[in-house]
Image (tube, rainbow, N blue to C red):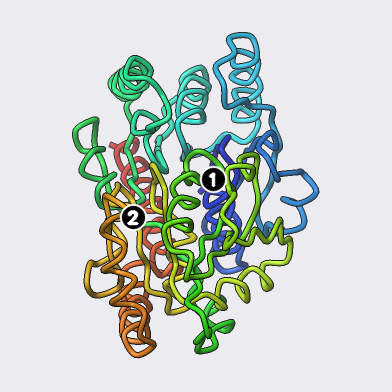
Amino acid sequence: MKVVHIVEALEGGVYTYFKDLSAFFGDEKNSKSIETTIIYSSNRNGVSVQKVNAEFSNGVKLINLNMLREISLFQDYKAVLELRLELKKINPDIIHLHSSKAGVLGRIAAFLLFKKVKIFYTPHGYAFLRTDISKTTKKLYYAIEKSFQWFFGGTIIACGDTEFEIAKKIGPAKLIRNGVNISDIYQHFIPQHNTKLTIGILGRITAARNPQLFNEIALRFPQFNFIWIGDGELNHLITAPNVTITGWILDKRVVFEKLNSIDIYLQTSLWEGLPIAVLEAMVLEKPVIATNIIGNKDIVVPNKTGFLFNKIDELENYFEVLNTFETRVKFGKSALKRCYDFFDENENFKKLAALYQEQFFAEANSLKK
């Protein structure tokens, strides 16, 4: 069976997801039954052909193809033709599209093959849920999702529970949650107790992560230390004197060591799919305080693994609760257990592989009839 994954938004959590996906499906055992190709774009920040070739499994085939995040009629038309050409060469049984732009370009390219191919689509956070765009643009994005689903068909594979509920209103949908490599991450765990409470976040400093809110929280609580593990184009918005920005760290082991060094993980996102960084923090037994939005609320269990908040005023009580080491340990162990229960990537990738197999053999049986 041949499966092709197409992704344009290869950065941040999606990059981690694909690196781990390549390791799973590129494994010698899995690659015997499922031949995997990843068609990606290296246009996103921090992504290069050299980086992908070095970090992705050599058990999968990698194809770099120029796709842009922004709408560009000429470039999008060119990308569709190039995608169609690559798909024609591969002759896949299943095409799995990831994120909005690939969902559009990939469906058109698959349609132009003029043959029946099973289509799966994972939004990784619907574009119409973004809060940095106008209501008109949101309506346009929703109309695109709805109309493309109606015209081209396929099955939506949601990465989180709330995304699943939304997806069911758009078309046929299944739930296979994002996950992380628990054993790989947990080896970096060492019980942590800083003299001064240290609160951190991991990721690119972009509008989606809401650095303004992170900075405002740091200013509101000068008695605590704050750390942003990463960097980004909006780093100038972080001005609070008690915030440290680490800059880019290329070694993932060092990233996990930095993440392990904090006491509380703070996710200030404006929108999410299902955030990988939050899961990584939970594996390292960090209680999580996160904005009450889709994605975050699918992971954090209030009063058990952390807290969800709508306003900064709520944080004073949450920080007070988590200011004691014993409470953080209790919440942290619950967070790790929740990852084992729902967000183990090996188990979730097995579910994805089983779905591919199920659909492949169902299609083969229908053709025999």
At x 71% / y 56%, what residue is drawn? 248
Q: Nearer the viewer, residue 165 or 349?
A: 165
Q: Is any atom of residue 162 visible in this view?
A: yes
**Do we see residue 32 in this rendering?**
no
Q: Amino acid at mark 1?
A: Lys
Instruction: Tell which residue pokes out farthest to the top in this image.
Output: 74
What is the CA distance from the residue labelled 1 to the residue labelled 2?
Answer: 34 Å
The residue pinned by badge 1 equals 2
Instruction: Compare residues 33 and 120 and report the one nearer the observer.
Output: 120
User: Which residue is farthest right?
Assistant: 50
Residue under pointer 2: 296
Specify few, some or many for label 2: CA neighbours under 10 Å numbering under 14, 14-19, or 20 or more.
many
Going 32% across and 19% down the picture, which residue do you hit?
135
Location of the C terminus (image quadrant): top left
Residue 75 pos. (x, y %): 65, 15
Which residue does the image show at 22% across and 67% down from the upper left? 302
Q: In the image, what residue occupies the spot 58% across and 59% down?
A: 228
Image position of 132 with respect to 280: above or below: above
